[in-house]
Image: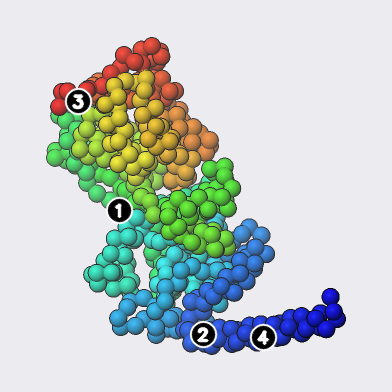
Amino acid sequence: MHDTVLDQILQTLAELKTSQQTLSLKVDKLQIENHRQQSHPLLHSQPKDIHQKAHQYHSGGHSDSDGDTVVSISPSFDADHLSEHLGSQSVFVDKPILTTYPDQPGAQPAHLKWGASTPKARGPIIVSRHPSSIGHRNAIGAYAGPYSIYRALAVAMGDVSYDHKPNFTNTQPPITIKQQPQWSDPTKIVAMDPFGHLPTEYFKNELAAGEDIRPTISITRAHMVVPEIANEVRDGTLRIDGNVIVNKDVEINVHKAAIDPVWYLPGVAERLKVDEEFLRRSLFEVTGGMYPELMTRPDIKVFLPPIGGLTVYIFGDHEKLSDPNTRLTVRVHDECNGSDVFGSDICTCRPYLIYGMREAIREAQDGGVGLLVYFRKEGRALGEVTKYLVYNARKRGGDTAETYFMRTENIAGVKDMRFQALMPDVFHWLGITKIDRFMSMSNMKHDALVDAGIKILERCPIPDELIPKDSKVEMDAKIAAGYFTTGHIPRQEELCQTVGRGWESF
Ligand SMILES: [Zn+2]
């Protein structure tokens, strides 16, 4: 090749380089201009920033050695700055903030140390994306679990202002749940906020400053009227004592607590024996990418998932719940709307729930305490739609105990998704270390509690006379699969003889 040709090529390359640099400068200038025009730093998620942030958070970001966020609420964060941009046409800032990144200007998560021993040391859980709080968010998700969606509808329809802040006057618990050592053990409670009923008491200043902090637990008292319990009184099995069963109308005195899930992701991952990063990825992907911050904010460790929570019903003196010298009867129940509320006879759910309630009341009347824990995990947490598909497959395919679990597995790919490993947290919250009578045959529930260090002295299967005829299929299948029983364990050849009602009889 001639030297002149080579020179020409080199010169062209040099020119290209210069024009590329010029172009690059122009782009940078445009971006800076763009930054200036935009109002809030959290809005800046230009591609260049994303890569920078991605690089930064891999090198640690704002976390201490435990991975806890250590930045305190900064009074200098300018909430008005954002509020200015709440236009009259839209209740939201002009451009949606699709996700956030650690170290992003304006992102200063409020101090949160999971497992700290006081609400102040632990810090408030702030999950709101309201302009007054978005900069301080230290949790992913939304308050109120699945009901956040209804709030979104109400805001979209203009029925409630996005700015509405709850008036918490007189909403405080009527009883004190005594703080237990378990509250400050970051391995014992990972799926709820042990201080979730107290933010209005401990974070008054933050609330007054406009921070959107909401309780994730509320506690109240009530009278219950349950027809089966009224029958038990009529039969003389239970008595009106004026304390637990209050009067001749068989009103039952109860304290109850509603609890929304609050997950400390490192703790949940450890409990489920999975990798936290992989758990985050799975939560992100399988929920349709609902929570990008599960991926972009590894510095935020708390997640409020969009799922139902649980309700605790306490019969008798709640202060004795944590006293190992007081007898305690417990039923842990997973929701089954078809049976619990509507009396479907294909399973034993309502009969077992009522049996547990009766024994809990009886224990309370005898000076002990009774406890029902009701989880919103419909159809073994597979959901009611899957459940009815399984029912159809069972009834069309020949409903025998032998094929019972196979029908569920064929459809859902798994026979149970309740994962009882997170269930014991509420027992730790109540300070329970021992259960005298456990009204359940489930090995999974039993083992989860025992693994959590809670003693179970007696397991109580549902009595035969309470088992509806059509639910014999489920009962035999469960017992054969290892559920606890004091009675006969059906052999394989017997399982195909336990047959449910066919559709001909409808
Ligand atoms: Zn059921």
The structure's colour scheme is: rainbow
* Camera-side mark, 4 or 2: 4
Q: Position of residue 10 (x, y in %)?
A: 78, 81
Tell me what residue is drawn at x 50 percent, y 76 percent: 42
Q: Earlier in the sequence, mark 2 or mark 3?
A: 2
- Tag 2: amino acid: Asn
Badge 4 crowding class, 10 Å Cα cut-off, few under 14, some 14 to 19, many 20 or more, is few
Q: CA distance from mark 3 to mark 1?
A: 44 Å
In the rendered image, the vertical position of residue 264 relative to residue 106, given as above or below: above
Q: Earlier in the sequence, mark 3 or mark 4?
A: 4
Q: CA distance from mark 4 to mark 2?
A: 22 Å
In the rendered image, the vertical position of residue 92 relative to residue 225, given as above or below: below
Which residue in the protein does label 3 denote?
A: 503
Q: Position of residue 189 (x, y in %)?
A: 50, 49
Which residue in the protein does label 2 denote?
A: 34
Q: Nearer the viewer, residue 20 or 441?
A: 20
**Residue 177 visible to an observer of this rendering:** yes
Q: CA distance from mark 2 to mark 3?
A: 67 Å
* Camera-side mark, 4 or 1: 4
Q: In the rendering, which numbered label is found on residue 19?
A: 4
Q: Quadrant of the C terminus?
A: top left
Q: Give left or right: position of 101 versus 175.
A: right
What element does badge 2 sit on? helix
